Image: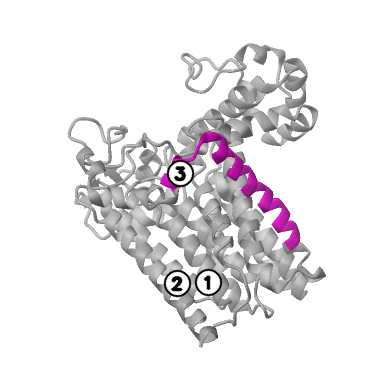
Amino acid sequence: MKIRFLPAMRQFLCVALFIIVVCRGCIVVFASPMIGAANVFDFLRQSSCVGLWEHYKDRPKWRGHPEGPVPQLVFDGDRDPGLCMKSVDNLFPYAAAHMHRKHDAVDLREVGAWKWLFTASMCVLLMLQRMTQGVRLGLSVGMFLALGDFDSLSFLNTMNLDYSVAAASFLAAGGCIVLIVRESAPRWRDLAFPSLMILWLGLSKQQYGGLALVLAALTAATVARYWKQWAKAGTILALGVAAPLSFNALNARQDGLVGAANAANKTDTFLWAVLPNAQDADAALTILGLPGACRAAIGKNWYTPGLQAHHPCQAAVDTSRWRLLPLFAYEPATFFAPVARGVRETQPPADDDLKRFESPADASSLKARVLRDTSLSTMLSLLPAGFYAFIVYAAMAFGLACSTALLARSMGIRRATLGPCAMLGIGGIIVFYAVVSSVFGDGYQDVRRHGLALLPGMALVLAGFACRGRVPAT
């Protein structure tokens, strides 16, 4: 009797967790007054692609509104290629806008609703993949911790790219995990879901194109090594390569907002994050291919007064980040010190500093308190800073160790530990990637938002402990 009850209980928990996640998302999306992340100017990148703009009473439509989210939009059709960031995430505001006529008023919650409808549909597809009940339970727990988190959900009602990063990183990882831990060789149709999610991730934001490639490469390596299915492995890897290359090709222009973002990101990376940690600054400049005149600019960032008008080290904008690798080998502190600071800055604050409520009084409502108090991000915010850093480093270590074990699967890794190993490994990889890509992508600027994928990474690491033991496949 006990043997039959356990699988049934796991199935019930999986369904219950999914329903809870969907309900939490609906509560946030349809909240009135609205819940969402405030516009910190980044909405401009999507609005100029779609022609759907914030409608302010007290400022131009292209200005930010850091005081809090504003639900009123207008579909005026005004597009500007020089400001547009081409991303698959733009499909959500495009769908919301084109449910209306030109010059109609649009509610920002309609954008959030399209995002949540697509996310919930993809969660259903993930749960319908063939897997053991233990893996399904682990992914359900991860879904609750990652996609049901208030921090992630608050990016639904926005016009920026961050929500797609959070959702796609979890779902792409989930799809890859299911493929990696299969008990039988995958069929071509089994590649459909992880391939779609890898494309969503890789086409969402330039920063996370590399993560799509890493997930695709790890999955392809295990498929090739364990089942010797080279065509399927090559297909997954090709998609992982194509996604970031396509994103870069679509946003290849060096003028306008894309060019300015590139200049800001490299300035913050080289001058603000890396070079201040070099003991021998002159040698570091030489390794990076920067002139000695850049020495005076070390420690400055894009927002240093006067820098944008008269850049003191234009060569930093023109150099490649690949030059960082020999510098890291020459002076490891230029890698480890920025990463250590980045880890500290990814911790959510105990008192949230992001304006997420149209009506500030709603922040203390019962609904908001329940959502936040049952979120992984809130639990992480309550940890002592030292312990938080320890568990992030531990997650990174799990990523290295367990990913190595996955690649050695055909050499005897136990079936009972394969699911947890995949979750711990891929979750740790996402945590590492989120921190490193944020710090060496834009220095210390807005690390917590840029590293939003750390949350689904940590969720998968924790879910790995809920997925143990072998049970029959369903």
Quick one: quadrant of the C terminus? bottom right
402 horizontally vs 159: left or right: right
Which quadrant holds residue 282?
A: top right
The residue beneath circle 3 is 85
Give the secondary structure at mark 2: helix
* Labels 3 and 2 touching (C-beta < 8 A): no
User: CB of mark 2 within 8 Å of CB of mark 1?
Assistant: yes
Identify the amino acid type marked 2.
Answer: Cys
Q: Which residue shows up at 66% across the image and 62% down it?
A: 421
Q: Camera-side residue: 18 or 155? A: 18
Q: Residue at x 67, y 34 (%)?
A: 321
Say which amino acid is labelled 3.
Met
Q: Vertical placement of 312 versus 192: above or below?
A: above
Q: Residues within 10 Å of mark 1 (few under 14, many from 20)?
A: many
Q: Is residue 123 left or right of residue 366?
A: right
Q: Quadrant of residue 290?
A: top right
Point out the stretch of residues depicted in magenta: 377-405
Q: What's the CA distance linking mark 3 and mark 1?
A: 36 Å
Q: Which residue is mark 2?
A: 14
**Of marks 3 and 1, the one in the foreground:** 1
Q: Residue furthest bottom?
A: 1
Distance from label 3 to label 2 (Cα)? 37 Å
Q: In this view of the protein, which residue sits in the foreground, 97 or 230? A: 230
* Residue 151 position in % (x across, y down): 40, 47
Can residue 175 be seen in this snapshot?
Answer: yes
Mark drawn on residue 136: 1
Q: Quadrant of residue 124?
A: bottom left
